[in-house]
Structures are given as C-alpha cells and as structure tokens.
Image (cartoon, rainbow, N blue to C red):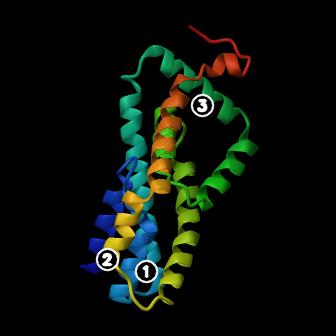
Amino acid sequence: MVYLTLFAIVFGVNLLPAFGPPTWSIIVFFELNHSLPIWALVGVAATASALGRLSLAYGARLFAGKLPQKMQSNLDTARDAIQSRKHNVWIGLGLFALSPLPSGQLFMAVGLARIPLLSFTAAFFLGRTVSYTIYALGARTLKKSELGDVFSEGFTSPWGIALQIAMLGLLVALTQVDWAKLLGKSRNP
C-alpha cells in the first residue's frame, strides 16, 4: 500500500505543469517515514515521475492542434531543427536528464512541438533514477523532517516562484518565436 501511495502522489505531482512540490521532497519524506529499500523507493518514484511527465506531454500534444497556425508552424520549425542535429539532441537530453530544474514546462514544450517522446522520457527516467538515489541516500542522514516546511518552501520561496514563472514565460515565448526566420529556413505554407 505504501508503494501504491508513493506512486500515486509522484505521478499526480508530475502531471502538474508548474507549482507542484518537487519530487525529491516526496522521496525524502517517504524515506524518512517508511524506511523502504532505496532501490524500490527510487524505482517506484522514477517510474511514476516519468509516466506523469509523459502523460503531461501527451496532454500538451492534444492541445497543440488548437494553437493558432502561426504558433504551430513555429513549433514545427523548432522540432525540425532539433531533430536535424541528433548529436545536439543527445547532449540536451543528457543535460536535461540530470538537471534539477523543473521539467514540467520542458515536457509541455516537447509535447506541443510533437517531438518523439519515448527517448526523451527514457532519458528523463534514467536521469531521475540517478538524482533520486542521491536524494534518498541523503535522506538517510537526516534525523528529522518537517514535511510542511519542505512543501511550503517550494511554494513560497521567492526564487522558487520566480523560477516557475520564468519557465512558464519561456514556454510561451517558445511558441512565439518565428523559428523558420531565426534559423534561415523557408516556411512551407
């Protein structure tokens, strides 16, 4: 039952495009309060996180068809540019997978741009497996935890709020860029 609860919470949080508590705080909480084997804790959390972000990206993909034609064209050009340089894709995926930055907006952008999701999600899963293991091992060294403080800091920290707003702004800006003009490519009407 504990694993199902962990999965449901992490999956639900990763369905949120912004302002959700960081998954690491949930891992720390479960580690401190349930003493689960780290491999199981990390495996459940990384799987739930990846599936939640994948679902978020598919949801954004469904919404992409409702965007104005100009935005769709800009996103198509961005997708083509990204996919034309495979080595850049792998470098970007590697950096993203291990980054502690919020990933909701990035998954929404990938969904809106209709970039293939499975390799992207696999890289995210592998990166989160590494970072979640570090968090779970770190939690073992803590003596006490105030879950409310951990969650409220993510919602009330000026830096946390500013980062979430900036990432949402970048998502909106992505759809406004005329990628064909920026990359010097002609747009197919």
User: Up-down: is 96 above or below 189?
Assistant: below
* CA separation in Å, label 1 and label 3: 36 Å
| Left or right of 78 in this view: 71 | left
Residue that sits furthest to the left in the current view? 1
Spatial CA span between label 1 and label 2 = 8 Å
Q: How far apart are marks 2 and 3 (CA)?
A: 37 Å
- Residue kind at label 2, given as amino acid type: Tyr
Q: Nearer the viewer, residue 32 or 127?
A: 32
Residue placed under numbered mark 1 in the picture: 40
Secondary structure type for disc 1: helix
Q: Residue at x 61, y 28 (%)?
A: 78
User: Which residue is at the far front?
Assistant: 158
State left or right for residue 56 relative to residue 89.
left
Please tell me whether residue 54 is drawn above or below residue 23 in the rendered image: above
Q: Report if the CB atoms under discs 1 and 2 are less than 8 Å apart.
A: yes
Kind of residue at disc 3: Arg
Give the mark nearest the N terminus, 1 or 3: 1
Q: At which x and y percent is residue 137?
A: 53, 84
**Mark 2 and 3 residues: CB-CB less than 8 Å, in contact?**
no
Residue bearing mark 3: 79
Is 56 left, or right, of 175 in this rendering? left
Residue under label 2: 3
Q: Which of 57 and 157 is in front in this view?
A: 157
Q: Residue at x 65, y 18 (%)?
A: 180
**64 shown above or below 97:** above
Residue 87 image-quadrant placement = top right
